[in-house]
Image (spheres, grey):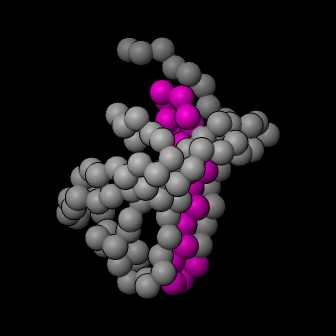
Amino acid sequence: FRVHKLEEGKQLVQPVTDGKRIVISTAKVIRREKINAGGKEYDTFLVEPEMKNIGGIFEKSDKSSFQIWVTADHYRVPVRIKSGVAVGSFVAELTSWEKGEPK
């Protein structure tokens, strides 16, 4: 996501991998929103990648979903990831991060 200019409604197309093969996939920028994670408020974009060409559990689930909230700045830090598949779901949230110095 870091190389793309994100804006609501934009469709992104890029290669992705499931660990075994590379496919061309799309992702849609749903909206810009402020969310709280790790006790801090972040200005983010909600992005929903299309999972139909990704293998594994996503391929086996009729209604699989994957949502990523990334910061709206140039860092595009993933703040929250939410996924649901046939066997269950999970939510992962950023608890903290620090800007590092380039090496």
Establish if 54 lies above or below 49. below
Above or below residue 87? Residue 20 is above
- Where in the figure is residue 66, as x and y percent of width and height? 50, 64
Seen as rendered, the residue at the extreme right is 39
Could you tell me which residue is drawn at 35 percent across and 78 percent down?
59
Is 31 drawn above or below residue 55 in the view shown? above
Q: Is residue 37 visible?
A: no
Tell me: 74 left or right of 35.
Answer: left
Residue 20 appears in the figure? yes
Q: Picture coordinates of residue 2 (x, y %)?
A: 40, 35
Where does the image place residue 17, in percent across and percent down from the top left? 27, 58
Query: The C terminus is located in which quarter?
Result: top left
Observer-nearest residue: 65 or 10? 10
Q: Position of residue 5 (x, y in %)?
A: 40, 35
Could you tell me which residue is drawn at 51 percent across and 20 percent down?
A: 100
Q: Residue at x 56, y 55 (%)?
A: 81
Q: Which quadrant would the N terminus be assigned to in this image?
A: top left
Q: Viewed as shown, does residue 28 lie left or right of 55?
A: right
Q: Which range of residues does the magenta coloring cover?
A: 70-88
Q: Is residue 27 left or right of residue 35?
A: left
Residue 77, relative to residue 59: is it above or below? above
Residue 79 drawn in magenta: yes
Residue at 45% x, 39% y is 6
Figure disc tally: 0
Q: Nearer the viewer, residue 42 or 92?
A: 42
